[in-house]
Image: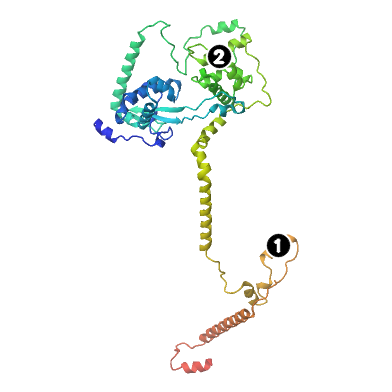
Amino acid sequence: MTSSRRVRRFELITERDSQEIGTTLSRQLRRADAFLAAARYMVRYHPKAGATTIRLAAAFAARMHRSRHGHVAFNLDATVRELDLSRRTVLNHARYLRELGLIAWVEHGSKRNVLRTRRGSAFGPGGYRGTATIYALVAPPAWDHAQGRRLRGAGYRSRLIGYTDMGRDRAVATARSRARRARTTSRKRCTPSVVVTSTPSLLQVDTREKKNTRRLREQSGGRSRRRTLITVEECQQAIALTEQVQREVWWLSTACSRRVAYALRPLITAGWTALQLAAELATWGVPGHLKDPAAYIHHEAGRRQRLGELPPTPAAPANAPRPDDGGRYEAMLRDRGRNTPAWRRYGQLVRPRLRADLAELRERRRAQAAAAAPVYRPVLREPEEAFFASLPADSWVDAPTPREIYAARAQGCAAGRGRVLSAVDDAWQDHLRDHAAASRACEGLRAQWARESADVPDGAVVGGPDAPRWRDMRE
């Protein structure tokens, strides 16, 4: 299949609903080189994309190390200054990347002040912080298919499970080229004053060997460090508290919340709140190139505790504002669409008239349904009381009904006999009596005919020569 056929078969993702993280068909990426490779391949499918699109993709890829999920914050002003482009150009090429399936929305930006929502009544004048647009860097299915990859699942949560024959050869060549570049780069040596400390990965493994453990234990008098066991709920609460602190302390934004929570565990166990921890960490002197914030907190907290520099845990006042656990912030994100000028105009101008029209329409439908409803007509041809009065006196009419019997038993008294009938029309009574008399006469004639038919001799023909004689006998 030629590349021209691929270009014709690929369809740009122009619907905004399909560019969200929950609806995209692209796969999650966590490595910058993989995203750049996908961008260089997919740029050919868009008629307006080009070198500027690749520059914007490279700017996004340079920020991927700040998030373990591959999410980047899209700061429009900073990106304009970094790429030396106009705002409209940056926004257009970001749209090209969304249409190519290379980025997807995690959160839409807002200019509303989120500090007011987070701090609640503790918010003071002079603070402002908006909500940035957050993108997830993803790999389109067309690029995975071109690279010969086999995936499990679909969408953002799909995973790479293998390669085709062509994809395996391509992956081996890419791995060898990456290893060759790594060996070439490692041979270059520079002085520490020239090399800037790189941002480490979130997971660091200490490979140093621990020797003479028994001798050290004997020197310490046999005392061994005991680990304080905590429950799962306490661990979750500590991580949630640490995330609140990370939103307030700038140099903790890229750190792993689990490791920072472990480093802050002595202070959290002592009763420190998120506001107290943020205020204390803000006073610490942070190095210019902080390599591991969690390790720095662990070391500095232990040193300050040994020297007695950490202040005691102050008791929170009775009327102190409750720190936000993220609920008010999430509620603000859900309701931010209702605070826009368009929503306010809708509430003032359109909604009252719309509700009035809907109420009028419902009332009209009820009136039409009531007019079209069939009129109930009783099944009996005569009134019920007239029917009861026409029955003989010894019938079940004189006996109490089952409801009356049960009511008498519940009240502990005897059931009455008979019922009081209302006055009825005499014409109905005469008609019903005549009908009952005719029914009894018909029954008698049927019985007499049956008895006389049983006395007919065998072989006699009704209507033959003997018919008059049998007729006279019947008379």
Percent across and percent down for residue 345 are 50, 40
Q: Residues within 10 Å of mark 1 (few under 14, many from 20)?
A: some
- Image: 51 above or below 181: below
- The residue tagged with tag 1: helix, strand or loop? helix
**Three-letter code, disc 2:** His
Q: Which mark is residue 74?
A: none
Which is in the foreground here, disc 1 or disc 2? 2
Q: Residue 298 carries which label?
A: 2
Percent across and percent down for residue 370 are 53, 61
- Image: 77 above or below 215: below
The image shows a total of numbered marks equal to: 2
Nearer to us in this view, 441 or 359 = 359
Percent across and percent down for residue 385 are 64, 73
One can see residue 37 in this view: no
Side of 317 relative to 248 (left or right) = right
Outermost residue to the right: 413
- Image: 305 above or below 99: above
Q: Quarter of the image holding residue 462?
A: bottom left
Percent across and percent down for residue 263 are 56, 17
Q: Earlier in the sequence, mark 1 or mark 2?
A: 2
- The residue tagged with tag 2: helix, strand or loop? helix
